[in-house]
Image (cartoon, rainbow, N blue to C red):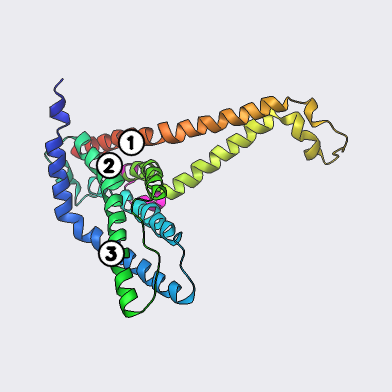
């Protein structure tokens, strides 16, 4: 099997150049507008009260988990739009290469550039405000470990919106949010039912309404077993979140993108 036929870094680089030439103005204007609003908020707040460094965490969170998610939701817009899918299909690259390029663009490049631009805006804005208004706000530390830990969580979380971008044909961001709410509701209901079935004897006196204060809660189950179950569930959730969520969403998005290309190609 010739791997280069389906995965060639040079072709991925050309896809990056194509996206940069066609979309950099649109993304830069959006990010610039957001940064301008952040700067204005910092100026206004600094006139009323002393700004704390934590305000940067708020703004970086908005950049990553709001604007980043919105951008990622448009990753495969060209593959779904009738007026654009011809150009998407005719790109001289495999489906895998087109997917990887979009994945890297919206999971790594755009958010990292946004953080760097925020840092530059913070420095420039600080100098201007200090010179002309005499106000002060804390300098953003681009090497702050908390910021890059936040970025790590973003890479995992944005995979869901990458999947939504491949799965839905329009209004991808809104539909992904709705899908998350529905999925979370289903999981909550199932979890409640499982807990109810497993610990029915424990909760039954409370539900009946004739709870006896002398009821021995430990008679129905072993508390050590409950603690072990809780610890096991916690570690399982960590494994799913850090190890499985992103790869499963990426794989699902790639499969859906292949399906979309086959349908449009036919």
Category of crowding for the residue at label 3, using alpha-carbon neighbours closer than 10 angstroms: few (below 14), some (14–19), many (at least 20): some
Q: Which mark is residue 147?
A: none
Q: Is residue 48 left or right of residue 138?
A: right
Contact check, label 3 and label 1, Cβ < 8 Å: no
Q: Is residue 13 left or right of residue 148?
A: left
Residue identifier under label 2? 103
- Distance between the alpha carbons at the discs numbered 3 and 1: 29 Å
Residues drawn in magenta: 166-175
Quarter of the picture holding the C terminus? top left
Q: Residue at x 31, y 47 (%)?
A: 169
Residue 168 lies in the magenta stretch:
yes
Q: Secondary structure at mark 3?
A: helix
**In x, y percent, where is residue 191?**
60, 35
Which quadrant holds residue 7?
Answer: top left
Which quadrant holds residue 5?
Answer: top left
Of label 3 and label 1, which has the lower sequence position? 3
Q: Residue at x 31, y 59 (%)?
A: 119
Q: Is residue 90 visible?
A: no
Relative depth, front residue between 205 and 256: 205
Report the label total: 3
Q: Considering only vertical position in the picture, is 106 above or below 27? A: above
**Outermost residue to the top:** 1
Residue identifier under label 1? 250
Of label 2 and label 3, which has the lower sequence position? 3
Residue 64 lies in the magenta stretch:
no
Q: Residue at x 75, y 35 (%)?
A: 203
**In x, y percent, where is residue 171?**
35, 53
The nearer-to-camera label among 2 and 3 is: 3
Q: Is residue 7 visible?
A: yes
Relative depth, front residue between 259 and 121: 121
- Distance between the alpha carbons at the discs numbered 2 and 1: 8 Å
């Amino acid at each position: 099997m010739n791997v280069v036929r389906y995965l060639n870094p040079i072709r991925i680089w050309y896809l990056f150049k194509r996206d940069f030439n066609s979309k950099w103005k649109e993304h830069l204007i959006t990010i610039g507008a957001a940064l301008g609003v952040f700067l204005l908020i910092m100026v206004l707040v600094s006139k009323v009260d002393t700004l704390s460094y934590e305000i940067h965490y708020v703004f970086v969170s908005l950049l990553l988990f709001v604007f980043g998610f919105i951008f990622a939701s448009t990753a495969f817009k060209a593959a779904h739009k009738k007026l654009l899918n011809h150009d998407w299909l005719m790109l001289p690259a495999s489906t895998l290469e087109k997917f990887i390029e979009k994945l890297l663009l919206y999971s790594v490049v755009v958010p990292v550039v946004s953080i760097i631009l925020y840092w530059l805006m913070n420095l420039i804005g600080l100098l201007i405000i200090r010179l002309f208004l005499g106000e002060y706000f804390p300098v953003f530390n681009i090497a702050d470990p908390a910021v890059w830990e936040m970025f790590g969580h973003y890479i995992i979380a944005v995979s869901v919106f990458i999947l939504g971008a491949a799965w839905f044909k329009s209004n991808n961001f809104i539909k992904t949010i709705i899908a998350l709410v529905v999925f979370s509701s289903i999981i909550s209901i199932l979890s409640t039912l499982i807990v109810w079935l497993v610990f029915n004897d424990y909760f039954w006196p409370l539900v009946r309404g004739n709870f006896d204060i002398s009821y021995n809660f430990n008679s129905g189950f072993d508390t050590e077993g409950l603690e072990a179950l809780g610890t096991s569930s916690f570690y399982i959730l960590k494994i799913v979140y850090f190890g499985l969520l992103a790869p499963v969403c990426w794989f699902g998005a790639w499969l859906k993108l292949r399906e979309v290309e086959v349908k449009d190609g036919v």
